[in-house]
Image (cartoon, rainbow, N blue to C red):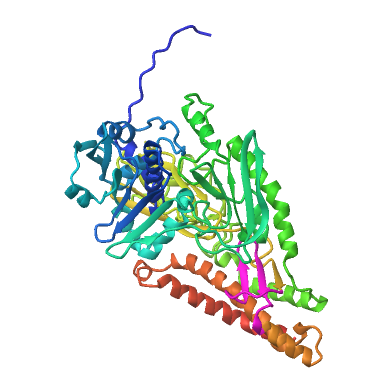
Amino acid sequence: MSSTVLEYESYEFDPRYYIHTPKNNITSFGHVIAEAVSNADEAITRRAIRDREPDAGRIHIRYDPGLMELTVTDDGDGLVTEEVRKRLKRVGAETEPGAKRAFFHRGIREAFNAMGVSTVETVALKDGVAVYTKAIFHPTDGMAIVKSDTPVTDALRKEIGITSRTGTRVAIPLRPLAATKPHQFTFPKLMEQIENSVQVRPVLMDPNRDVVFEFGDALPRRVRFSSPKGEELIAEKKVEIADFVGSIWARAAKEPIKGGGLSRQTRRFGILIRGERAAYEVSLGTKLQTYPAHRQLFGELRIDGIEQAQREADEQADEEAQLIYEADRSGLNPDHPLVEAIYQFLDAELGSVLAALEAKERKKKLSTDMGRHLLDLARLINEAVKLEDFGDIEAPEGRPTKEAEPKGEEPIPPEPPTEMPIPPVEDGIAFAYNRIFVGAGKTRTIKVWFDTAKIPVGTTVELEADRSGVLRGVRLSAFEVPEPPTHGIGELLLTIQADEAEGREEVTVRAGGYFVMLPVYVRFPRATGFIRDIVPVDEDWESGAALYDPQTGRVKVYVGRPEFVDVAKRASKDKIQDPFDYLPYRMLVVESVREAALRTAAERRAEVLFDELAYEERQEQDALSRLALTEYQALDYKLRRPLVDSFVYG
C-alpha cells in the first residue's frame, strides 16, 4: 500500500444545492408546520429551565389566506443576535445540549429555503434585559440581520405579537404550495393537517402546551390530538429492543379509526414511535397490516434513547454512519438495525393480539347455504370489476409513451439495432411511460428523457410531488440535465416510493421552461380478485351497512344494524330459521355489499379515466367526482341483472 499522504480540498456547493435539496424534502404544509412547532416547543422548554418554572407555554399558529403566509409565535426563551447566527444561519450546526429532538441538518432552515424569503423576530434576555432581533433569510443570499439586540418597547411587542417576557415569531411564505393547491389551504384542511402531523403529536397531546390556530380574521381555535376510546390490548409496560429501554401500550377502538389518511406521517391508527419529545412515524411494523383489525389499533412505543443514537450516527463522519430517520421526513429508515428490531418487535408483540381481536369479533355463524351464496356474490362482483379497468399492479407499466407496434397487425421481430434507439421526446421532456402503477409500500424507478437541443445540458431540473399519503417519497438521480449519448437525449432516473394507501398522485418534472406530468396510481395487490371474502359481523355500526377494506379485499356486513335485526325477526315469525333464506334479508345483504364494493371500484376507475380526459374537461369543477359517479352507475348497470338472476330467482 502506498504511503503517499493525500491532501484533500473542501467541497464547494452551488447555491442551487441549498434550494433544490430542501424543495425535495419540504413538499407540504405538514412538513413546514412540523418544523416550526417543534422549534417553538423546544424554546418553551428552554425558557422553563431558564426561569425555573413548570414546562408550560403557548404556541400561536396563524395563516393569512390573502398573503398566503404562515406565522408561528411562541413564548419561549427567544434568541439574541449571536444565537440567531449560531443556530439559524449555520447549516449543519450541532444540536444544542439537552435538545429533545434529533432532526439534524434540516429543521426550519430548510423550510425557509424551500418556501422563499422568511423572517424571524425574537425577544430574548441579554444581561437580564429584554432585547429584540430581526433576521431575514433568503434562499440564496443568506441571512441578513435587520435589528440586532435593540431595546424592546410596548409598541414593538404589540406590533410583532410577542407580549410575553420573551418569545419568537417566525413568518414563512407558503405561496409555492398554496397557489398550486388552494384546496389544501382552507381552514378545515389546514386544521386537519396540524392535528394529524406525527411530528407535532407529542406537543398537541401535552396538557402543558396551549396550541391555537387562527385562519385569517377568524377567532383562534385550540388544536389538540386525542386518541379514541378503546379496549386495552397491552397495558403500559417496559420493554427492551436492541439494547434500548422503552415502554409500550396499545388499545383497540370499537370500529376502524378514520381520519388522517394512511401515511406514516398522518394516520391516526397504528403505533406512534417516539422519543422523549420527537415523534417519527405511526407504524404497523411489517406484518400488522395483514390483519383486517389493524385499523382499530392505536398506541405508543416510546424509546427516549433513540435521539441519542440519532445524534451519535449524525456525528460520525465515516461511511458506516447511518441515520435512523429518513432524510425526506417520510419516517424511520427501515434499513437501520434499530428500526428493523422495532418492526420485528411490533410484529411479534401485536400480531397475536390482533389475531385474538379478530377472533373475538362477533362474526355471524354461517350456514353452508349462506356461505355458498356469499362466495357467489363475491365472484359476481369480481367478474364485473375487472382489475385492469382501474389499475392492476400485475401489469404496472401503464402504456409506453409511443405505441411500439401498429394496431391490428402481427408484430414483426425487429432487426438487432446497430445503435441506441432515440427515445420519443416531442415536448422537451418525456417519461418512458405515460402513467405507472405501483404496489402500496413498494418502489419503482423509471426513465426521464430530456431533448438537449431544446434544454441545454446543465439546466436545473425541478421535481414536484405532493406526498400527502399516497406517495412516501420521490427523487431524481440528479438535478441537472445530463450529458446525452450520441442521439442528443439526456436521461435521468426517477424513483417513486409509494405509501401504504391507494390513490392517485401527480409527479411533475420541469426544466428550461418545459415540463411533463406523470400520473402515479398506488394499488394494493389483489391476487384473489377485487373482493377476497365477505364476512357478516353481528354488530351495529352507524357509519354504514357494509365496509370494504381495499388493503385486505374483505367486506364486513354489519348485520347487527337495526334494519338487519328487524328483517331477521320477520323471517323468524315466518318460520324461516336461516334469515338468508328470506328474500328481503338476502337482498339487504347483497345491496349492502354491492354498494360498499362498487363505490371504491368506481373511484379507482375514475382516477385512471380522469387522465384520459382533455385538459379542459379535467379543469371543470367536480370533474373527478362526476366521473366516479358515472363509473359507479356503469358498474351498477353491469351487475344488477346477474345479482337479480342469482339471488332473486336463483
Does any portion of residue 426 appear in the rendered image? no
Q: Residue at x 38, y 38 (%)?
A: 484
User: Measured along the vertical axis of the image, is residue 575 above or below residue 456?
Assistant: below
Q: Which residues are magenta?
A: 538-563
Magenta includes 2? Answer: no
Q: Quadrant of the C terminus?
A: bottom right
Where residue 536 sits: x, y (%)?
71, 73
Where residue 531 sits: x, y (%)?
66, 68
Q: Nearer the viewer, residue 399 or 272?
A: 272
Where residue 527 sits: x, y (%)?
67, 60
Q: Nearer the viewer, residue 570 or 502?
A: 570
Left or right: 195, with 71 as reference point: right
Magenta includes 558? Answer: yes
Q: Nearer the viewer, residue 107 or 405?
A: 107
Does any portion of residue 50 appear in the rendered image? yes
Q: Nearer the viewer, residue 332 or 362?
A: 362
Q: How many marks?
A: 0
Where residue 216 sits: x, y (%)?
28, 62
Residue at the outermost bottom position: 574
